[in-house]
Image (tube, helix red, strand yellow):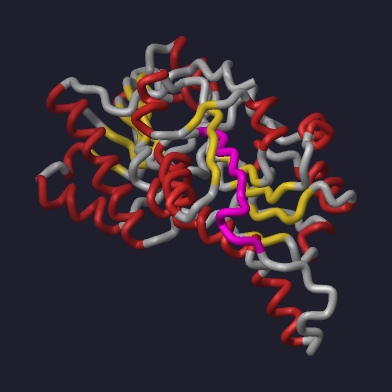
Amino acid sequence: MKTFVMEPMPHLFWEEIQKKGWNSYFTESVTSNDKIEIIIIRTKTDFNKDKFTEFPNLKMLIRAGSGFDNIDIIEAKNRNVIVCNTPEANAFSAYEHTISFIFALVKQHQICKDRVLNSNWEKNFMPNWEMSDLKVLIVGVGRVGTRVAHALQHLGAQVKGVDPYLSVEEWKQKNIESLIYKEGIKWCNLITYHCPLSDETENYFDGRVLDVLKNPIWLVNTSRGKVVNESVVFKGLLNKKLFGFASDVFTEEPWRVKEFAHNLNVILSPHIGAHTNKAKNRLSLETLQVWSDFVYKQQINNNINSKFTHYL
């Protein structure tokens, strides 16, 4: 099946294709769109209705990575195009990035550095938290969220989760207590988001959540920028309902810097949660596994379901 690779892939991806003798299947440029049956994209391609129209014989769209908010899933379903992703590739590095954010926030790394540089030391310094002080709400208890939960449990934190797609048995296997979102935000003092972006989860952290909070919280987002309303973050920092905010993702990328970004309680990174060599290698191998299982075995891996309506 002729496969169009629309965005740059790591070197290992092409090495494996060469090694397997699959070169004739893959192309990075197209002369005849109607010959393309499989397309591989990453984050920069907005695969909307017009893109689907350009490739009338498309059978499979592979999103090399975990997020799929840049794909019109409904249009894919209407055209019987299978959409798959590679959820394992970035999971470990994204989990590590989240944990690093949590430590940096609750141990006040940036504030501490600022005090050293300004010879301010301990004057009016809010004591650091220990992990056992945390009551963590994990929103989206999938591959990343589960790892985050277990690491924090091991460190002594109380952890509960929100994920409407898990069965009772899956919650038991994960050893994580389930809550509905509205109850979780009343209970926690730290929220970390790992849910997909959809119509239902856009602005998931909004003004209504801020109003419901019973305790000030630490807020972490390594899912998608639009899950958290940035204007509400600014409001929460001003009225002290947020102790601090850490994010690897933004409503627009590259991001137009907002005023709250200069707050020492705010930690930001430029969407690099999966930017490790090992994650890139896993991305290459998992993408080719999805591709080869479909081409040679007629097997579909990591098929994306278009229904995301239960998080609220």
Q: Position of residue 92 (x, y in %)?
A: 38, 51
Given residues 48 and 130, the one toward you in this image is 130
Q: Quadrant of residue 121?
A: bottom right
Q: Classify 33 as above or below 53.
A: below
Given residues 138 and 284, the one toward you in this image is 138
User: Which quarter of the rendered picture does the C terminus lie within?
Assistant: top right
Give, as a single range, the part of the protein colored magenta.
129-140
Number of marks: 0
Identity of the residue furthest to the top in this view:
78
Q: Quadrant of residue 109?
A: bottom right
Q: Position of residue 191 (x, y in %)?
A: 63, 43
Identity of the residue furthest to the bottom in this view:
119
Q: Quadrant of residue 223?
A: top right
Examine the structure image and report whether residue 130 is included in the region drawn in magenta.
yes
- The residue depicted at 79 percent of the width and 89 percent of the height is 119
Q: Is residue 185 left or right of residue 294?
A: right
Examine the structure image and report whether residue 25 is included in the region drawn in magenta.
no
Q: Position of residue 275 (x, y in %)?
A: 44, 59
Q: Position of residue 5 (x, y in %)?
A: 35, 41
- The residue depicted at 69 percent of the width and 31 percent of the height is 204
- The residue depicted at 72 percent of the width and 68 percent of the height is 127
Q: Classify 121 as above or below 198.
A: below
Q: Is residue 301 left or right of residue 112?
A: left
User: Which quarter of the rendered picture does the N terminus lie within?
Assistant: top left
